[in-house]
């Protein structure tokens, strides 16, 4: 069965390349014509944490899809995921599988879209969290920035044959962890990513942002509020890789010290595979930073952390700190605010003003 990956950027492109190299039938689909042309002409060039390689791949534009689709990985930017599935509706069958293969809370929206068009959305959608990272630098060129596992699961927690098959196929790229609570893990990633959003307020490396205790304290307060939003929605937030939600409920200064140590450990895990002597990494910050600074385009914040705030409001949770953070990012994207450490000063003052500083 052909695995169709919609979105041949860093996340989709790396998955497609490694699965193709392992002998699986993969088609990469992207709307950037120059990228598609480069993939077909020269293959996908990858450098970064695993060194250099070029993988011959098959690629197509969305309007070139004509055959019914079986397994579909939607690896677009989060804000484009639902519309990407909408365009695929004529090619889907009742036994098609649609994997939301990016950040954000898109699974429930994709289920609703499929239901509204005569499909059984819950039966078709698979949830996932790809925790590896990269950057689409130029047409046909992806930088592999950091290692990380993939969480994968049916929305109802079942262990199905299609889930096990896809997990084996994706293991050509990295470790795949099959989950019986993928929705809780998706929430965990979005809760954790509040501090990733925080890091994008400045044009600096992560060690100069989350690696500084003063700034890590502000980020910890933001994540603690995000965790409270999840709890207000009755979500059992799952620990993953380098994130343990228990660390983000500090009651004493000693608890805060453990949290700060955990944040430093997470930074080490993200950077431990990067050898600056052999490769000068172009992507120096998060995907949000990459979109704002390198691509000069809106990031995923509105469709990921923005939806977290919406969930919080509906549940009656306090969302003031995350709301302030996201508003600052939106202002940067719209050219009404400059990147810089003054943003941390402003957010720190707000944390203290509303009484949310860590002990």
Image: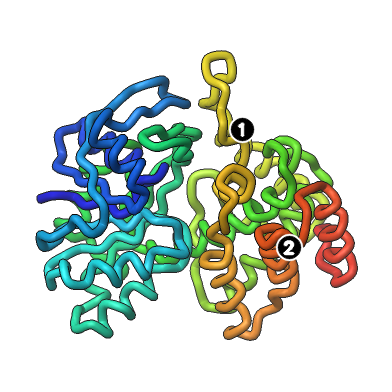
* Residue in the picture at 54% in, 72% down: 307
Mark 1 secondary-structure assignment = helix
Comparing 305 with 342, the one in front is 342
Give x and y (percent) for residue 135.
48, 39
**Helix, strand or loop at mark 2:** helix
Relative to 93, is 196 on the left or the right? Answer: right
Position of residue 115 measured from the top left corner of the image (x, y, whole percent): 26, 82
In the rendered picture of this protein, how many numbered marks are placed on residues? 2
Q: Is residue 327 left or right of residue 122?
A: right
Circle 2 residue: 328
User: Is residue 204 at all visible to an observer of this figure?
Assistant: yes
Q: How is the image coloured?
A: rainbow
- Residue 224 in view here: no
Residue name at image x 81 percent, y 55 percent:
343
Q: Residues within 10 Å of mark 2 (few under 14, many from 20)?
A: many
Q: Quadrant of the rendered structure where residue 182 is?
A: bottom left
165 shown above or below 308: above
Label annotation for residue 268: 1
Q: Position of residue 230 (x, y in %)?
A: 57, 71
Marks 2 and 1 sit apart, C-alpha to C-alpha, by 27 Å
**Residue at x 72% of width, y 42% of height:** 203
Residue 49: x %, y % from top left: 46, 26
Looking at the image, tell me whether mark 2 or mark 1 is earlier in sequence order.
1
What residue lies at 19% left-to-right and 32% top-to-bottom?
Answer: 22
């Amino acid at each position: 069965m052909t695995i169709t990956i919609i979105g041949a950027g860093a996340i989709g492109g790396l998955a497609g390349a490694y699965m193709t190299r392992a002998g699986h039938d993969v088609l990469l689909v992207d709307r950037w014509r120059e990228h598609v042309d480069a993939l077909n002409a020269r293959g996908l060039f990858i450098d970064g944490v695993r060194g250099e390689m070029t993988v011959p791949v098959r690629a197509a534009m969305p309007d070139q899809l004509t055959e019914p689709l079986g397994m579909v990985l939607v690896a677009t930017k989060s804000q484009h995921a639902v519309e990407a599935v909408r365009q695929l509706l004529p090619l889907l069958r009742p036994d098609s599988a649609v994997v939301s293969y990016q950040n954000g809370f898109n699974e429930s929206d994709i289920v609703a879209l499929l239901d509204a068009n005569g499909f059984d959305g819950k039966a078709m959608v698979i949830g996932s969290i790809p925790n590896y990272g990269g950057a689409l630098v130029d047409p046909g060129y992806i930088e592999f920035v950091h290692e990380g596992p993939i969480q994968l699961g049916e929305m109802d927690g079942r262990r199905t044959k299609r889930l096990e098959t896809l997990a084996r196929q994706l293991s050509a790229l990295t470790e795949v962890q099959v989950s019986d609570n993928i929705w809780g893990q998706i929430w965990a990633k979005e809760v954790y990513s509040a501090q990733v959003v925080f890091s994008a307020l400045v044009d600096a490396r992560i060690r100069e942002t989350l690696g500084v205790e003063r700034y890590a304290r502000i980020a910890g307060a933001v994540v603690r509020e995000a965790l409270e939003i999840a709890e207000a929605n009755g979500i059992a937030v799952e620990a993953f890789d380098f994130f343990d939600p228990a660390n983000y409920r500090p009651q004493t200064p000693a608890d805060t010290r453990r949290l700060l140590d955990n944040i430093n450990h997470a930074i080490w895990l993200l950077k431990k595979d990067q050898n600056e002597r052999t490769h000068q990494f172009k992507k120096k910050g998060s995907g949000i930073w990459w979109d704002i600074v390198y691509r000069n385009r809106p990031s995923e914040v509105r469709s990921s952390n923005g939806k977290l705030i919406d969930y919080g409001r509906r549940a009656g949770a306090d969302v003031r700190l995350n709301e302030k953070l996201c508003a600052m990012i939106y202002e940067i994207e719209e050219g009404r605010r400059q990147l810089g450490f003054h943003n941390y000063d402003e957010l720190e003052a707000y944390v203290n003003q509303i009484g949310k500083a860590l002990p």
